[in-house]
Image: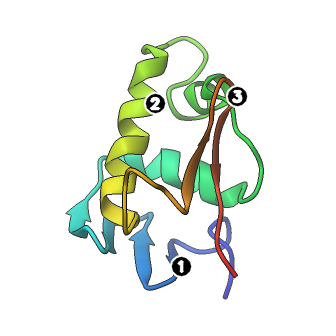
Amino acid sequence: MADAAETHEFEFDGRHINFRTFEASGPGGKADLTRRECMVAKYLIERAGEVVSRDQLLDAVWGYHAYPTNRTIDNFIVHLRRIFEDDPKNPKYFKTLRGVGYSFRQEG
């Protein structure tokens, strides 16, 4: 399957996200993402296995001049986990590395 940078859709372990329509589905059900939620997910998915700092996410999604708080990123990750994780409190895909940032890990 083509990666997220080449397509407008991404599937992993029965989960699905459409970066064009902002629709997502997973164990948490179907959901409509906001444009920024979709951008956060895409940024992490395109860098699967890499650790991405909050500042990198803020720069990529909001830009250099419009900085929300770092907590904003945390809230976006929590929402993505509710949709895509079997157990949002023990994430398998959208991981946190305390004090460093976030990463997307695709099993297998």
Q: Of helix, strand and loop, which one carries label 3?
A: loop
Q: In the rendered structure, which disc, 3 or 2, sits on the residue that comes first in sequence?
A: 2
Which x, y percent locates residue 33? 29, 54
State if disc 2 and disc 1 touch (CB < 8 Å).
no
Q: Is 47 located above or below residue 96 in the figure?
A: below
Q: Which residue is mark 1?
A: 12
Disc 3 to disc 1: CB gap under 8 Å: no
Q: Is residue 90 above or below residue 1?
A: above
Q: Quick check: 52 above or below 25?
A: above
Distance from disc 1 to disc 2, alpha carbons, whole Å, reads 22 Å
Q: Residue at x 40, y 64 (%)?
A: 85
Spatial CA distance of label 3 from label 2 is 13 Å
* Residue under the point 53% across and 79% down: 12
Gap between marks 3 and 1, in whole Å?
A: 25 Å
Query: Which of the 4 quarters of the picture holds residue 4?
Result: bottom right
Which class describes the residues within 10 Å of circle 2: few (<14), some (14-19), or many (20+)?
many
* Quadrant in the picture for residue 101: top right
Write down the residue under mark 3. 100
